[in-house]
Image (cartoon, rainbow, N blue to C red):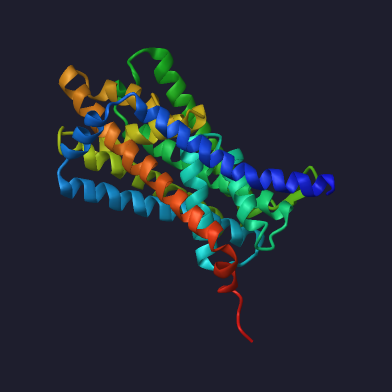
């Protein structure tokens, strides 16, 4: 067995390693709570609100899976819809929990897409493109979040306000450059022998739109379980959530653990509100992080077990 084959198998099996890592990280996040606390956090939320949260989580992961559809459009390849939906769902449910999305999500994508005839260079392009999908959506939502977020959400000192303003300005510049390049920059960017083209303006705007939907849906998961306990207008909540979500991803802390607590403890001061936030965050992490991870694990096991039969159903009959 040559070195190339060994490396390919190693990278492929890393996907399972990151699934195990994601499971461990979500266990660490929830293990600080007792079973009674977890149960009470969910049972204290009205059924309708849980249903809204579950629906928002489902739509959010559909949007996340669509990242892979856009990436396939970018490399001008077509696959059956179930393939990119499966890969996107499993990849993001793992990377959301394990952190380091490019590495953890990238190995999952290599495991799947290499089986379906997509070469390693194109897989690198897809992973890079998906990273930029999230990045440009972050640029857009940081701008929106800056406008919507009340000043007290991030502290009242001058340095905090200045750093937030600088982040917003950089986001405006970053989004403007990306959209300008999608129209006017036609040269390839060659990195380690792989040529990257700028997407056209239509595809770039689709990136902003799809990337924004998944973050907005994630915010609705938390808002649905929080609003039944405390009065907070959606505009204030949405602005804070956008900033918290983006900071959590950039910090590479799995699930943004600690970021939400910091942001929302400033918005909802007082011990009574902290108890409410405690229960809402438990429910949020179960619905948006734990349940998709468990479901993706089941899907992954079923697919690996029946892989040959499932893949054969995608081959057209003559």
Q: Residue furthest right?
A: 2
Q: Residue furthest front?
A: 305
Residue at screen point 46% across, 55% down: 299
Task: Tell me where residue 27 sits by quadrant.
Answer: top left
Q: Is residue 252 visible?
A: yes
Residue at screen point 41% across, 17% down: 160
Height in image: 8 above or below 80? above
Q: Is residue 139 visible?
A: no
Q: Position of residue 118 (x, y in %)?
A: 69, 60
Height in image: 300 above or below 143? below
Q: Position of residue 275 (x, y in %)?
A: 20, 24
Q: Position of residue 93 (x, y in %)?
A: 46, 45
Towards the viewer: 316 or 229:
316
Please give left or right for residue 259 compared with residue 6 in the image. left
Residue at screen point 60% across, 62% down: 73
Residue at screen point 22% across, 39% down: 225
Q: Position of residue 7 (x, y in %)?
A: 75, 44
Please give left or right for residue 201 compared with residue 25 in the image. right
Towards the viewer: 170 or 217:
217
Please give left or right for residue 142 compared with residue 56 in the image. right
Towards the viewer: 196 or 296:
296
């Amino acid at each position: 067995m040559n070195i190339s084959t060994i490396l390919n198998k190693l990278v492929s099996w890393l996907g399972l390693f990151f699934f195990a890592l994601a499971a461990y990280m979500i266990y660490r996040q929830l293990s600080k709570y007792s079973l009674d606390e977890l149960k009470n956090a969910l049972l204290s939320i009205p059924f309708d609100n849980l249903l809204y949260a579950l629906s928002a989580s489902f739509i959010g992961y559909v949007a996340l899976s669509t990242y892979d559809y856009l990436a396939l459009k970018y490399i001008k390849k077509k696959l059956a819809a179930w393939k990119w939906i499966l890969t996107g769902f499993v990849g993001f449910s793992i990377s959301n929990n394990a952190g380091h999305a490019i590495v953890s999500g990238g190995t999952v994508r290599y495991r799947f897409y290499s089986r379906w005839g997509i070469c390693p260079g194109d897989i690198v392009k897809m992973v890079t493109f998906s990273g930029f999908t999230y990045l440009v959506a972050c640029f857009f939502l940081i701008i929106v979040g800056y406008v919507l977020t009340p000043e007290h959400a991030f502290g009242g000192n001058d340095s905090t306000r200045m750093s937030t303003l600088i982040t917003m300005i950089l986001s405006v510049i970053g989004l403007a450059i990306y959209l300008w390049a999608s129209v006017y920059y036609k040269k390839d960017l060659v990195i380690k022998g792989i040529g990257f083209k700028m997407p056209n303006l239509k595809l770039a705007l689709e990136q902003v739109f799809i990337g924004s939907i998944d973050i907005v849906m994630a915010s609705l998961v938390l808002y649905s379980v929080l609003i039944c306990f405390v009065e907070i207008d959606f505009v204030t909540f949405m602005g804070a959530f956008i900033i918290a979500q983006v900071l959590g991803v950039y910090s590479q802390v799995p699930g943004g653990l600690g970021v939400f607590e910091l942001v929302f403890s400033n918005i909802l001061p007082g011990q009574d509100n902290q108890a409410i936030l405690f229960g809402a965050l438990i429910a949020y992490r179960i619905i948006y992080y734990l349940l998709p991870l468990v479901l993706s694990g089941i899907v992954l096991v079923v697919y690996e077990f029946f892989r040959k039969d499932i893949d054969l159903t995608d081959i057209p009959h003559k």
